[in-house]
């Protein structure tokens, strides 16, 4: 007997237990299209102070919508909001980095210094570290230790290994063999080459393990800090006298408001030494900014813009005209936010492969966030079909739903998306109904294959699919060499499958709200969207509740009206016909495409069969698989099965059961065989009334 892997993870209990709840939540999955990107609005970024770039939260950015000093609100002008321009002020690289323009003459630099040991000095000569010309913006402010970790000599050629350590954190970034080929970006933005750790001198081997050099890197600057300093070299010796004593008397010269500092020279000039009078003159225009007495405990705050100092008293050596010049240089900020400032970026980034996996949704807003708002063209083409499909499902009373996004509606991409439903989803026992939101015959055939595969004895994930006619599809038409299209009757007959429900007609009208203008317009949709609502009838009610004569929600009119004879013709071929009933649209007869036999033609009978299979599998598998096959196990299983089936009767899923047989398999001692028959709850489809005239006496 071939090996069969266990397919149910069990909770072991020692004795038989009653079943408190039969079955599990029945779930719909939709396969369709959505936005292939996400939009992020006004992500706040703190401008880096140690490198000329900032990293956005999400990768694969393909379009920057805006970069601004304040959040951008659509339809609203924000005062004093600086808008930075891509290509002028910044660039985007690597799909995630905002690269700011570097100021002229402020390019990144690299400096190498050796420790004081002879070995370290010798080791320095074997090291080259330069800025990588491909991505120089990656250079950051930092210090790194290049340390010998292994020394060897082979055939006279130096060899060995070294490690690179971040000197600030003492983190070992990596360990490498010496080579003439540079290592890229182990020191960010740099090319590091270490040719040998074996260095000899007059006294033999000079290097030893632990010798190191320091590599200090400075990022390219997008701004320079404001500075203030005494300037003893710039003055007119004919009219002014520089006084070192006066400079020494000035205390606590510092910047207090970086943004207020200007590029200029300022002079402190002694006016009257005896009284302590002095003045502050701006050199550029010879305007006196201040004149007064030197005094203790007084701060000369921002008389020189952005600067403060103390001058408690003039020096005793002060003479009239003694001068000290102070030079200030303003902070230079290019067309960038200032270091440490917060700015805001709105952008679009491509979805990663994992974003196309199956996802579960409990509310419509989350669907919009994931796939974007839908739109319907005048021709009925739907943009972001998953969003519209989810809206219809929620509106028709089904929650939660599973969505799987295909990259586009091509048969290939739709098949890839459908295949993802073969995997088990966390928190979901099974997906009972699957719909592909496309009208391609190849996709319809593929999803039919999928539900039959998943419903097989090996997979044991019973599923059904609902497909629909395409707009304008005729009632009947055979394919020809020139025109491969077939009619609705031929399509249904080609499936002839109890797991495939084929909904006709191929078009239905629905009121669609334009998210931009808010106007509501009636538009024609492909029939697959009506099929979603029909599928919801099979999920929101119990499995035995007939679909026949039930209304679907969310549509205004059917765009095709069939005569009664045409409806009979379609239904006889296996088409589930929708019909207009006043303002409502209802299911005329809830049938599958397999109409040759009653137990396969009614949707509810297939659902009942799947439901019973699932609850029996869950109840016995979770309880008994993995237990000892002792003599008492037969009675334990009988107890559980009786509870399961009796609850199905109480729920009006079945009317009864008979012939319950539980015994060990005669060939496989690890197997228990359970057999029984059920009496299903059949739908009431026909009422026939006969009457006649009574004989007149």
Image: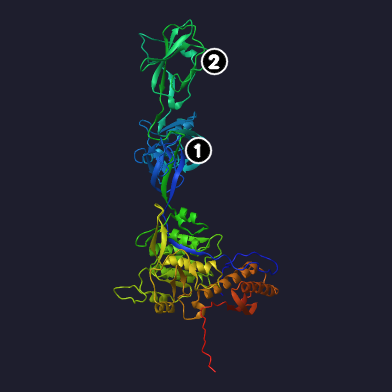
Front: mark 1 or 2? 2
Q: In the picture, which quadrant includes the C terminus? A: bottom right
Residue 288 in the image, given as x and y percentages of width and height: 40, 14
Q: Secondary structure at mark 2?
A: loop
Count residues near mark 2 (Cα–Cα under 10 Å), then give few for <14, some for 14-19, many for 20+: few
Which residue occupies the foreground of this view, 525 or 264?
Answer: 525
Quarter of the image for the N terminus: give it. Answer: bottom right
Most extreme residue toward the front is 697
* Residue 466 place in picture, x, y as percent: 46, 69
State yes or no: discs 1 and 2 in contact (Cβ < 8 Å).
no
Residue 378: quarter of image: bottom left
**Mark 1 or mark 2, earlier in chain:** 1
For image coordinates 49% across by 42% down, the residue present is 174
Q: Give residue 165's mark.
A: 1
In front of the other: 590 or 170: 590
List x then y, in percent, for residue 231: 41, 17
Q: How is the image coloured?
A: rainbow
Residue lying farthest bottom? 697
The reply, left or right, for residue 469 in relation to residue 623 is left
Find the residue positioned furthest to the top. Answer: 274
């Amino acid at each position: 007997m071939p090996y069969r892997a266990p397919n149910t993870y069990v909770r072991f209990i020692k004795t038989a237990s009653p079943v408190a709840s039969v079955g599990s939540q029945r779930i719909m999955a939709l396969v369709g299209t959505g936005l292939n990107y996400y939009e992020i609005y006004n992500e706040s970024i703190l401008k880096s102070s140690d490198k000329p770039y900032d990293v956005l939260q999400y990768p694969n950015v393909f379009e920057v919508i805006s970069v601004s000093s304040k959040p951008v609100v659509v339809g609203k002008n924000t005062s004093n909001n600086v808008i930075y321009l891509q290509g002028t002020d910044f660039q985007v690289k690597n799909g995630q980095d905002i690269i700011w323009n570097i100021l002229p003459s402020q390019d990144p630099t690299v400096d190498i210094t050796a420790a004081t040991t002879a070995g370290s000095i010798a080791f320095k000569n074997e090291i080259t570290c330069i800025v990588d010309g491909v991505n120089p913006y990656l250079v950051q402010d930092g210090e790194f230790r290049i340390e010998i970790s292994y020394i060897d000599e082979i055939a006279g050629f130096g060899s060995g290994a070294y490690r690179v350590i971040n000197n600030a954190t003492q983190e070992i970034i990596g360990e490498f063999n010496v080579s003439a080929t540079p290592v890229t970006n182990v020191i960010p933005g740099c090319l590091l080459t270490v040719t040998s750790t074996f260095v000899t001198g007059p006294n033999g081997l000079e290097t030893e393990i632990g010798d190191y050099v320091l590599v200090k890197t400075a990022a390219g600057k997008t701004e320079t800090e404001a500075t203030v300093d005494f300037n003893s070299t710039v003055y007119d010796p004919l009219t002014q006298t520089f006084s070192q004593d006066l400079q020494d008397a000035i205390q606590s010269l510092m910047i207090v408001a970086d943004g207020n500092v200007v590029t200029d020279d300022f002079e402190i000039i002694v006016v009257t030494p005896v009284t302590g009078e002095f003045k502050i003159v701006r050199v550029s225009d010879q305007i006196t900014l201040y004149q007064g007495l030197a005094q203790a405990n007084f701060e000369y705050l921002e008389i020189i813009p952005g600067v403060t100092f103390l001058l408690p008293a003039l020096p005793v050596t002060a003479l009239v005209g003694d001068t000290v010049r102070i030079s200030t240089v303003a902070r230079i900020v290019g067309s960038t936010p200032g270091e440490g400032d917060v700015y805001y970026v709105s952008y679009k980034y491509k979805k990663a492969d994992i974003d196309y996996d199956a996802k579960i949704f409990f509310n419509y807003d989350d669907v919009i966030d994931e796939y974007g708002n839908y739109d319907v063209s005048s021709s009925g083409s739907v943009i972001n079909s998953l969003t519209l499909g989810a809206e219809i499902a929620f509106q028709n009373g089904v929650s939660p739903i599973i969505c799987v996004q295909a990259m586009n509606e091509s048969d290939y991409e739709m098949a890839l998306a459908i295949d993802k439903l073969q995997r088990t989803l966390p928190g979901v026992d099974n997906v009972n109904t699957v719909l592909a939101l496309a009208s391609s015959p190849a996709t319809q055939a593929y999803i039919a294959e999928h539900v039959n595969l998943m419903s097989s004895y090996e997979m044991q994930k019973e599923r059904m699919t609902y497909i629909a006619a395409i707009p304008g599809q005729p009632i009947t038409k055979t394919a020809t060499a020139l025109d491969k299209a077939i009619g609705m009757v031929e399509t249904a007959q080609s499936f002839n499958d109890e797991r495939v429900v084929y909904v006709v007609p191929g078009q239905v009208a629905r009121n669609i709200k334009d998210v931009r203008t808010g106007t509501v317009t009636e538009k024609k949709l492909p029939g697959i969207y009506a099929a979603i609502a029909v599928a919801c009838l099979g999920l929101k009610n119990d499995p035995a509740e007939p679909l026949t004569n039930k209304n679907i929600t969310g549509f205004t009119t059917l765009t095709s009206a069939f005569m009664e004879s045409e409806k009979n013709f379609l239904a006889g071929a296996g088409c589930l016909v929708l019909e207009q009933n006043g303002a409502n649209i209802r299911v005329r007869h809830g049938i599958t495409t397999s109409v040759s036999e009653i137990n396969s033609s009614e949707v509810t009978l297939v659902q009942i069969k799947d439901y019973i299979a699932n609850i029996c599998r869950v109840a016995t598998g979770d309880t008994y698989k993995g237990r000892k096959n002792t003599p008492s196990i037969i009675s334990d299983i009988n107890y559980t099965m009786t509870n399961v089936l009796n609850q199905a009767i109480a729920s009006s899923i079945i009317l009864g059961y008979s012939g319950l047989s539980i015994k060990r398999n005669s060939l496989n001692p690890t197997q228990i065989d359970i057999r029984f028959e059920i009496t299903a709850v059949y739908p009431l489809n026909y009422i026939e009334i006969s009457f006649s005239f009574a004989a007149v006496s």
